[in-house]
Amino acid sequence: MRGALIRIAGVETQVSGERGEFRLEGIRPGTRKMVVTCLGYRPLETDVTFVRSGELVLPLAPAEPRATDAQVGAIRGRVRVAGGREALEGATITLPALGLARVTDREGAFSFPDVPPGLHAISIALLGYAKRVDSVQVAAGRVTDLDVPLSVEPIPLEGITVTAEPRWLASTGFYRRIENRYAYYPGRAWTREEIEKLDPLFIQDLVESVPGVSYDPARGYTTRSRSCRLALYVDDAPMPDFDLRVLDPRQIEAMEVYYGGMSQMPTEYGHKHCGVILVWLRH
């Protein structure tokens, strides 16, 4: 399995690759204690006798049944050069208490999909850069994003920027869509923070603030030309006759409004509608 930590006293800790492979070098003949840890599996502690070069298979037994998304959180992030945006590939990210590690890809990205909630120590190391150790708070049911700058000199570093997103909202594609909302999709999207800042009296006030959208008592929300009726979804369930006026803006985690024809709609909805209102409630 990927991301297992292999520890032997006096030997540099190894991290298993995509197929669980690892390589130990410079070990003198004799018996050594080996400890292997990996999230989701029971720790393995065993004595291994080294005589000559060869292959070693280490079986790990599964731990308790996997927790549900509501019981665990997740960490994802990107490692970059301090003071710039250049991604750093090959950095080792470790959660020591969990016995879990990842290596950043070409984009400097890494992720830990299933992390118990709580405060966790995190270590970031890359040859030629100052190693840093920090802590990160993980909440159940949420994805914690990290922006990690590394410096080539051991000087005071920028702080790690931490943001926590609702995990269920990330799984619906909301954050992917709002990253591209102005580039590809005509319309508007609001996060909870943006809604709280605007402090609308009614949620439909936000919908009607979108240029090109109006309310028709007979047809509901349409484009100004009335050539397109916007479909309404609440938590990804179609609600064609739902009245937005019954919703308190404080109940909303996020909202999206898109229109402009099927070819300009998000792929999840473009094959069905020429326009759509997506309401995501707080959970």
Image: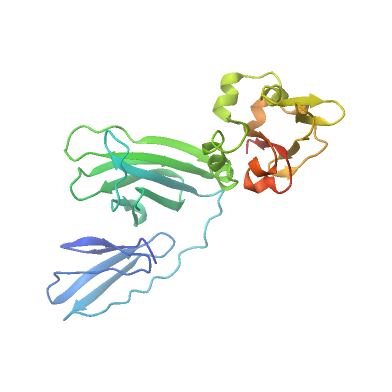
Q: Is residue 198 visible?
A: yes
Outermost residue toward the right in this view: 218
The quarter of the picture where residue 261 lies is top right
55 to 194, vertically: above or below:
below
The quarter of the picture where residue 20 lies is bottom left
Horizontal placement of 21 versus 25: left or right?
Answer: right
Quadrant for the N terminus in the image: bottom left
Q: Is residue 138 visible?
A: no
Q: Position of residue 135 (x, y in %)?
A: 34, 40
Horizontal placement of 117 versus 121: left or right?
Answer: right
Q: Residue at x 63, y 47 (%)?
A: 267
How many circles with numbers are drawn on the protein? 0
Q: Position of residue 104 (x, y in %)?
A: 34, 52
Horizontal placement of 30 versus 172: left or right?
Answer: left
Quadrant for the C terminus in the image: top right
Q: Position of residue 225 (x, y in %)?
A: 77, 28
In front of the other: 74 or 126: 126
32 to 183, vertically: above or below:
below
In front of the other: 62 or 129: 129
Q: Position of residue 111 (x, y in %)?
A: 41, 51
In front of the other: 186 or 230: 186
Q: Residue at x 47, y 38 (%)?
A: 164
